[in-house]
Amino acid sequence: MPERSAPVGVFDSGVGGLSVIKALVERLPHEDYIYLGDTARLPYGTKAKSTIVRFSIENAEFLLSKGVKLIVVACNSASATALDALRARFDVPIVGVIRPGAEAAVQATTSGSIGVIGTEATINSGCYEQEILRLRPGAHVLGKPCPLFVPLVEEGWLDDPITRQVAERYLSAFRAPRVDVLILGCTHYPLLAGVIADVVGPQTAIVDSASTVAAAVEGLLLRMSLANDTNSPGTHRFYVTDLPAKVKRIGRMFLGIDDLSIELVRLGSN
Amino acid sequence: MPERSAPVGVFDSGVGGLSVIKALVERLPHEDYIYLGDTARLPYGTKAKSTIVRFSIENAEFLLSKGVKLIVVACNSASATALDALRARFDVPIVGVIRPGAEAAVQATTSGSIGVIGTEATINSGCYEQEILRLRPGAHVLGKPCPLFVPLVEEGWLDDPITRQVAERYLSAFRAPRVDVLILGCTHYPLLAGVIADVVGPQTAIVDSASTVAAAVEGLLLRMSLANDTNSPGTHRFYVTDLPAKVKRIGRMFLGIDDLSIELVRLGSN
């Protein structure tokens, strides 16, 4: 049984999962966090399932070597593909990003019409739709890939007239009454939540996967008596498998901190 | 010695190299073409050099199994990394995209100040700068990654107000007299040549790597007496290693033809 004082581990194929770290720190500030971004092998979404499972196991083994008590899979492709394999192999609780988002959307919808936006790989996989239909058979799910949103976030063009025009073009189909809930099914998108909410209007609730995952982690830690009971602020350590200049810049933007220290590690065959 | 009637082979990590096919067909309409897009393993730019070399060899072996007389490496990362390995291993002429673009830019510049735009991987690799400085020591090379251009092209937003605003933000530094030549160092960018030329203005010459490669291929085929001497229009066959829905849509857009038939092949470990 892990210790309450052990850190929470989070992995993603890149830096997008830092939005989950940000939401976790806001909700659970006394936990310590270990983050791994597998930047050398991204993107996962376009790879074979067996490859995504293998990479996910290597990522989880790395986090477990750092003594984590719980693992958050902050990557949509790995959440859709590798959760069962990870749970079969490792004893610590494993939390993905898809089910918490789908649950929050099903709770929030009145009409049963739910929108999902994400990368092309996430939307084409139908992973949110499957989870929503499992929770609420008969729900209507409208998915749309928004491939410009990730590079817009990575350029730092967050509150920007160009981003607003792109959002208007992508999201016109998600205004009420077409859907009453919109899931941000990509860990980059919370940084665009303001623009997205403006565009779809107040009648469409936004479900942000980062904060729903943080809520799920809090619930799990409390139920399993694994929440850190210290009163001091937690620590954070960030690892990536490749460290181009943009990773630090984007990491600082995601976390809103300037003195971000990131360590390079080598995993598997990279 | 290959036959004059043998096809020309072109490979890329994805569909961008289809802009090279289009330029080749315009310049050399009597040749037959075999195209391979390694869509299952893209992008190459973020991968280790040894991996890019291995993938490039597998791609070349596939094209040679189809009897090609010449191979165009229509991928910037493979051109920067794998040309020597390919030339050492295979007997057919191998043409990359970087040297023809660099040569055309050096011929076109008066001031010696040359701009290069491309993906983050291409610009950070410095491959165009090295080639330009080898051809013209003392040249001043100004590189800028334009990460939104590829997804804008793949969305089909070519002559579009959003694309124009993005181009204005990226390219303001390339207006004369800062540079007098701008190299489009990515095979997606020829589709944005009109917008890019408008934004940088008539004092900055645009060097489009697709048409410079086509000119290099024509010169090589003539010098080696390998040009097809038929009068009938050539044929084209397109292969990819993964075939999501978007590949056909984007392929049609690149080539400007509606009845595009693409075959799926499996290479190496995919």
Image (cartoon, coloured by chain):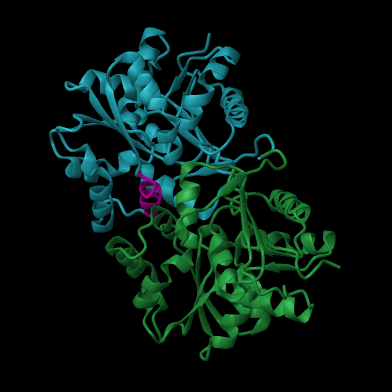
Chain colours: A green, B cyan
- Would residue B63 be seen by someone viewing this image from the given angle? yes
Which residue: 52% across, 12% down? B2
- Total numbered circles: 0
Which residue: 18% across, 38% down? B175
Q: Is residue B150 magenta?
A: yes
**Rendered location of residue B241, percent (x, y):** 59, 41
| Residue found at the very far bottom of the displayed protein | A110
Q: Is residue A231 above or below residue A257?
A: below
**Rendered location of residue B104, percent (x, y):** 28, 21
* Pick the front one: B93 or A92: A92
| Residue found at the very far front of the displayed protein | A232
Quarter occupied by residue B111? top left
* Pick the front one: A22 or A96: A22
* Pick the front one: A230 or A238: A230
Q: Is residue A237 left or right of residue A185?
A: right
- Would residue B257 be seen by someone viewing this image from the given angle? no
Which residue: 62% across, 62% down? A74
Q: Is residue A268 magenta?
A: no
Looking at the rendering, the stretch of residues picked out in magenta corresponds to B146-155
Q: Is residue B125 above or below residue A183?
A: above
**Rendered location of residue B141, percent (x, y):** 30, 27
Image quadrant containing the C terminus of chain B: top right
* Pick the front one: A121 or A197: A197
